[in-house]
Structure formats: structure tokens, C-alpha cells
Amino acid sequence: MTHEELLVANALAFWNLAISRADKLFLNLTEKELDRAVAPGKNRLIYIWGHLAAVNDSLFSLMGIGQRLHPELDEVFITAPDRTAVNEISAADVKKAWTEINAKLSSEFAKMTPADWLHKHTAVSDADFVKEPLRNRMAILLTRTAHMAYHMGQAALIEKQ
Amino acid sequence: MTHEELLVANALAFWNLAISRADKLFLNLTEKELDRAVAPGKNRLIYIWGHLAAVNDSLFSLMGIGQRLHPELDEVFITAPDRTAVNEISAADVKKAWTEINAKLSSEFAKMTPADWLHKHTAVSDADFVKEPLRNRMAILLTRTAHMAYHMGQAALIEKQ
């Protein structure tokens, strides 16, 4: 592999590690366990899981690599704070969405060349991208991997009890 | 910049973003505020800050890019769980160590070429590295950036109170 291919492979391994850690936690919890909050008055695990699924789903449009699969997640897990959504989404449906979204992302990511990763993301204009070439798809991949880690750190507060 | 240089620049911007977010939180807290736990019975902010400083300091040896600056942090912030260390380290000393460590890392990172980033880290053998070329310094950079995000997610639980 070339240097640029290896660097992309590093970033994808980093993403896959975050997905596998989240899988290991969330896929093994019962509905009752998913209903626990990470700290008194804070988000429940089911909310964090749905939130991560929604944010990962937003990568399709943000990277310009396809249509998102589950826009219905946003209202419940992004717009509404935990415990306030008018309509709920079941743990089974979050699990299904999470699995589908990450499988499709993985499949799309596998097709991308280093040049594809350096392509601008869709939230930056052509003019701004000329001045700020790091506002690319790779930046989205890295920051959204950290976004998973951020919430996994919160989830770990109750996992170890 | 070449593709490989841009990909490295993305990873460094990712690291710098995590450092600046941690700076923004920790450098503005009083000693009393740093003494708060992120959730009942969980780590205090001062412990998380010292822990992040210690883990970042370990990158010098793990990447083979110099001598670490503050090995005294490990006993208090890695080996000992929070509130159990025999000797304490003051908030002022954590701040000094954190700032020095990150400044030196930043200075060393700035000298590294894409090939340097793809060099094996020191915790993998030559033989294993041949089989697993992603066990390189870039993997360390990415996973330790996520490590900061993991604990920043916990710290955010009280920041917003």
C-alpha cells in the first residue's frame, strides 16, 4: 500500500474500532438496561445509542456519499432532549437502524480512494474549501469517531457499576 | 500539499481540536471546581485532567519521539484510582505538566513526515509490524485523541450543570 492508502486504512481502522466498541456495549444490553441513565438526570443509554445512530446516519449527506437511511431518528434523538420526544423509537428499531447505517457506511467507505477522502464535505462552500482544504470528508470521519468515543465515555460510567 | 501530507494534516488538526477543547474546559476552572466528580462516586475533574496529561505524556516513548516529561503523573493518575494516591499533585502542577507535555508533543509532531507517522510504534515487535502495518504512530495519535474525547464526554456531564 502507498503512504496515502495506509493513512486512510489507519483512519478506517479507527472508525471500525469505535463501532465495534459501541456494538459490544449496546448489542448486549436488555431493554431495561438500556433505560438506565449514565448519571442522575442525564441521558439514558437508549438515547445515547439512538443519538449515535442518527449522527452516523447524517454522514451520508454530509460526505455526499448517498441518501441517509433513517431520518426519523433525528426528531427523537437529536432535536428532542432525552425523555421529551413525542414519539418514541423502540430499542429493537434503534438496533436495526444502527446496524443498517453502519453496514452501509462501511460499504461506502470501502469504495473510497484517498482522493475521495480529501474531497470537500457538503457543509463547506467551494470558495471556503479553497482556503481551508482540511474541511474534507476525512475531517468528518475523524470527528464523528471522536463523537462516538465522547458518548462511550459517558456510557462507561454505568457500564462498570 | 500531497495527499499524504493532507491526510497527516487532518489527523493533526483532529488532535489539536481535542487539545483546544480540553484547554477551554480545564484551564478556566478553579481548584474548587476541579474537585467536583463527574457523577456521584466517579472521577473528579482534576483526576481526569491529570490522567489525560499522563496518557499524553506516554506518547513520547510509545511513539519513540523523545523522553517523557512527567513520569510522576502515572502513580497518581493512572496506577491509583481517584482519591487513593498516597501523594497528591496540585492543580497548578497538573496545569504546568499538561501545558508542557502538549507543547512538546506539538513541536515534535510538526517535524514528522508522513513516512514518520507510518513508522511502527514501540509497543509492537518488528515481526508483528510486518503483518500488521497499521500498528504505527498514526494509530497512536488517533486513538489517544479519542481517549481525550472519551473523558471530555464525562467531564461535560458536570460542565453543563
Image (tube, coloured by chain):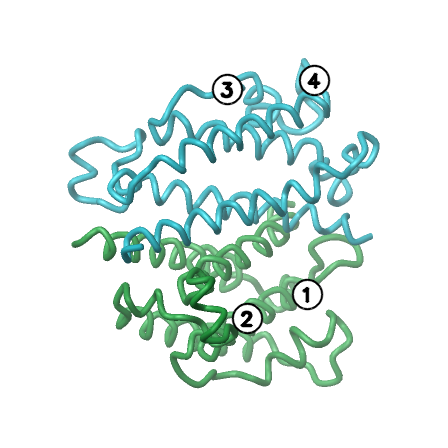
Chain colours: A green, B cyan
Which of marks 2 and 1 precedes in the sequence?
1
Nearer to us in this view, B142 or B15:
B15
Q: Secondary structure at mark 4?
A: loop
Q: What chain is tagged by disc 4?
A: B
Q: Nearer the viewer, residue A2 or A51?
A: A2
- In the rendered image, which residue does mark 2 sit on? A55
Q: Subunit of mark 3?
A: B
Quadrant in which residue A80 is drawn: bottom right
Subunit bearing disc 2:
A
Q: Amino acid at mark 1?
A: Asp
Task: Please tell me whether mark 4 or mark 3 is closer to you in this view.
Answer: 3
Q: Nearer the viewer, mark 4 or mark 1?
A: 4
Q: Position of residue B102 (x, y in %)?
A: 53, 32
Q: Which residue is mark 3?
A: B69
**At x 51% / y 57%, what residue is drawn?**
A25
Residue density around tag 3, few if under 14, some if 14–19, many if 20 or more, within 10 Å: some
Q: Amino acid at mark 2?
A: Val
Which of the two labelled residues, at mark 4 and mark 3, occupies the earlier sequence position?
A: 3
Disc 1 secondary structure class: loop
- In 3D space, how far apart are the residues under numbered discs 4 and 1 (Cα atoms)? 38 Å
Image disc number at residue A35: 1
| Disc nearest the viewer among 1 and 2 | 2
Judged left or right of residue A17, residue A35 is right
Mark 4 and mark 3 on one chain? yes
> What mark, if any, has residue B88 been given in the picture?
4
Q: Amino acid at mark 4?
A: Glu
